[in-house]
Amino acid sequence: MSVLTARTTLRKSETTCTIIHGDSRTELAEFVGQVDLIVTSPPYADARRKHYDGVHPDEYVDWFLSFHEPYFNALKPTGSLIINIKDKVVDGVRHRFVWHTIEALCERGWFAIEDYLWHKTNPMPGFWPTRLRDGWEYCFHLAKSKRPYFNSDAVRKPIGDWVDTRLNKLGQNDLSRHNSVNDSGFGRDISKWVGRDTVLPSNVISSEAPDEEEFTRAEGTPSNVISRALVGKNKGHPAVFPVELPAFFIKLLCPEDGLVVDPFGGSGTTGIAALSLGRNCVLIDNNAQYCGEAIRRLCDEGGAEKEEDIIQQSLYEIKQ
């Protein structure tokens, strides 16, 4: 159990994670120009009324824009912002507050670098008369410049077994660039893949899920996505994403000596990912219970420790 007053810093090897209980719009003022990556999943509209102040979809854009300047100012010129979010069904139709929020941010100087999809193949079962289960969520990549820090080599994956057969049977059209026969403008040169072991992943993020079987046997409406995907277990918080999700973006968008911030830190998943990858991080949340849970998880699951000098400075205490 955790007794809260303000903040705690935990350490893993030479890397630290600071958990701050407070409003990120205020707390980020001390990090101006220092942050390489902000990766977060903010409260969805009207989705967490028992855990955060509910925000109506019609008011969501104005609410999120109150974080625009603190986020923008905290980032380095090469920094990035990742927003994991999902829109909401209101009176039977999708409310597009998510799209409107991204558009509003771009009108204020953010560059929309890329849209990623997080595929989930075991979403909660249920039945709806006009739609299927949600099997994916947005991950928007925004940045302060059109060329933010981007290390695609850090997320490369094995090229796959197809090369063993396909590249052993190169035809005449495979030895140089072969343009599409339907004049689409697309082309390829298969011979360039000879000898390569890895390939860049797509902008659809998926991986094996440790608890994949949890909902696959449940009856109900099928998902709107057909794929294998990441899944997070509930860790004392209503909206936990899997560690692999922030880890992917940390590897891609934050240098090895960089600083990661999650301004809606929740139960600490981003912190666990950052420490596992050797990045310093700051987690901010206005819910004291979640801050305490984040500290517990960072110690129990993330391998972080509270050194004696850190404990004396800390305004949190974890009672074992």
Image (cartoon, grey):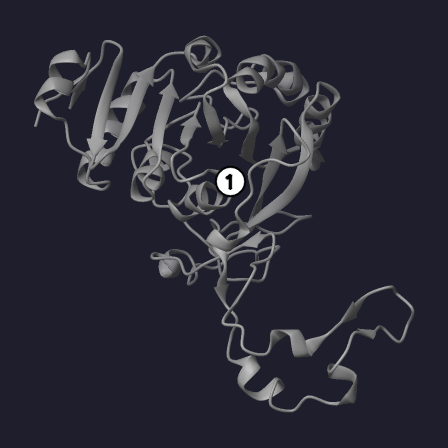
Query: Does residue 91 appear in the picture of this structure?
Result: no
Q: Is residue 193 left or right of residue 286?
A: right
Quarter holding residue 299: top left
Secondary structure at badge 1 equals helix
Quarter holding residue 16: top left
Quarter of the image that includes the N terminus: top left
User: Within 10 Å of the Cα at label 1, are there few (<14), some (14-19), or many (20+) other Cα atoms?
Assistant: many
Q: Is residue 228 left or right of residue 3?
A: right
The one nearer the camera, 79 or 291, is: 79
Quarter of the image that includes the C terminus: top left
Question: In the rendering, at what x and y percent does residue 125 appear?
Answer: 48, 51
Q: Which residue is mark 1?
A: 253
Whether 77 is drawn above or below 229: the answer is above
Whether 168 is drawn above or below 129: the answer is below
Question: In the rendering, at what x and y percent does residue 217 appear?
Answer: 42, 63
Question: In the rendering, at what x and y percent does residue 55 appear?
Answer: 56, 18
Whether 304 is drawn above or below 161: the answer is above
- Residue found at the far right of this picture: 183
- Amino acid under label 1? Leu
Query: Does residue 126 appear in the picture of this structure?
Result: yes
The one nearer the camera, 236 or 251, is: 251
Question: In the rendering, at what x and y percent does residue 134 appear?
Answer: 57, 48
Quarter holding residue 236: top left
Tag count: 1
Q: Residue at x 60, y 52 (%)?
A: 203
Q: Residue at x 51, y 80 (%)?
A: 161
Q: Is residue 227 left or right of residue 262?
A: right
Q: Residue at x 57, y 56 (%)?
A: 223
The one nearer the camera, 291 or 153, is: 153
